[in-house]
Image (cartoon, helix red, strand yellow):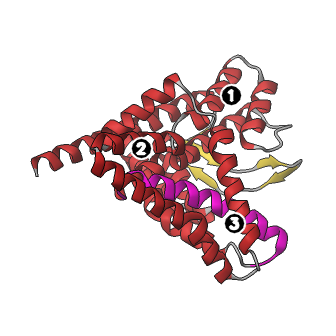
């Protein structure tokens, strides 16, 4: 059922792309803000109680609905699976921006590529070279493929019905929203949300990194995975980026202009500097990893039927 749900979501997404920001991100962020406004008294235990309301309760309610529908008719449970997956995962959340940036660079329109990158990643882009734009776009695509596809898919497989997909998406949005609020108020309200998401994302990070290694340059991917993420600002995403860069044979990270100043970042990967050709290679890497996932789901389905 997991494989058929995944195939159905990919097909629906091609014919009816989802406006993720308007339909999913903004409503869930508003929900997180609402709960935060009611519970944020500054303490970690307040954050724990709020997280249970904002994340755990919706996941449990979804599990009850799924089990009721599945007991009534398995097809109804499958439809719910497809619907929740369609809302919580998908390539179109980032592929449109990425493809447009790649096309602009191919045509030599650096200014448009900068504009598209700034709209996608909400960052200043003036002064970026074509190589800088390609590098940041590849980093964004690898990170987004993890957070919008592979991590959601793993939790979808691990928990019954669509509960895992909702758990990952809600936990990520709640963490980001509450961390921003915590930075403004200088308290510990978001500490539990950060720790909970770190636990939730621990296994997906490594499965995504492993998938990139298997379908790319395995030796370089594993070497980069083991030696480079500790120096990346967001270490958990650094695991995915380092493995992806090693699998592609490209150098990511490094210095970049951020808000008019040069920001020094650790280097990830090995090989040549990023350019528009590596952008196409990154697309191939993500698709090969997706095919690997689908093959694994097919084999698991066969094993279940045999059992």
Q: Give the prevailing secondary structure in the magenta stretch.
A: helix
User: Could you tell me which secondary element the residue under label 1 belongs to?
Assistant: helix
Q: Is residue 142 left or right of residue 63?
A: right
User: Could you tell me which secondary element the residue under label 2 belongs to?
Assistant: helix
- Which x, y percent locates residue 306? 10, 47
Q: Residues within 10 Å of mark 3 (few under 14, many from 20)?
A: some
- Mark 2 or mark 1: which is in front? 2
Q: Which mark is residue 35?
A: 3
Q: Which residue is mark 2?
A: 80
Q: Which mark is residue 101?
A: 1
- Which x, y percent locates residue 215? 37, 41
Q: Residues within 10 Å of mark 2 (few under 14, many from 20)?
A: many
Residue displayed at 54% across by 25% down: 16
Residue displayed at 17% across by 49% down: 304
Q: For residue 216: magenta?
A: no
Along the polypeptide, which appears first: circle 2 or circle 1? 2
Does 9 appear above or below 226? above
Q: CA distance from mark 1 to mark 3?
A: 37 Å
Q: CA distance from mark 2 to mark 1?
A: 34 Å
């Amino acid at each position: 059922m997991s494989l058929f749900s995944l195939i159905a979501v990919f097909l629906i997404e091609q014919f009816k792309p989802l406006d993720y920001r308007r339909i999913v991100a903004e409503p869930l962020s508003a929900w997180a803000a609402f709960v935060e406004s009611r519970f944020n008294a500054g303490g970690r235990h307040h954050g724990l109680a709020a997280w249970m309301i904002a994340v755990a309760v919706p996941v449990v309610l979804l599990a009850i609905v799924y089990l009721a529908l599945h007991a009534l008719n398995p097809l109804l449970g499958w439809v719910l699976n497809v619907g929740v997956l369609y809302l919580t995962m998908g390539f179109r959340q980032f592929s449109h921006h990425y493809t447009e940036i790649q096309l602009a660079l191919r045509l030599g329109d650096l200014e448009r590529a900068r504009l598209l990158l700034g709209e996608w990643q909400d960052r200043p882009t003036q002064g970026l070279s074509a190589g800088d734009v390609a590098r940041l776009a590849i980093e964004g695509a690898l990170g987004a493929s993890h957070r919008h596809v592979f991590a959601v898919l793993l939790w979808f497989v691990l928990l019954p019905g669509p509960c895992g997909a909702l758990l990952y998406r809600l936990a990520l949005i709640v963490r980001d929203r509450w961390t921003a609020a915590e930075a403004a108020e200088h308290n510990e309200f978001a500490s539990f949300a950060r720790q909970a998401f770190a636990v939730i994302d621990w296994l997906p990070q490594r499965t995504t990194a492993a998938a990139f290694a298997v379908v790319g340059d395995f030796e370089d991917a594993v070497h980069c995975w083991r030696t480079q993420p500790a120096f990346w600002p967001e270490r958990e995403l650094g695991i995915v980026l380092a493995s992806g860069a090693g699998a592609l044979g490209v150098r990511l990270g490094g210095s970049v202009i951020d808000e008019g100043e040069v920001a020094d970042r650790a280097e990830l990967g090995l090989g040549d500097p990023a350019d528009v050709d590596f952008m196409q290679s990154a697309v191939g890497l993500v698709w090969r990893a997706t095919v690997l996932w689908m093959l694994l789901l097919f084999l698991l389905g066969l094993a279940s039927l045999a059992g």
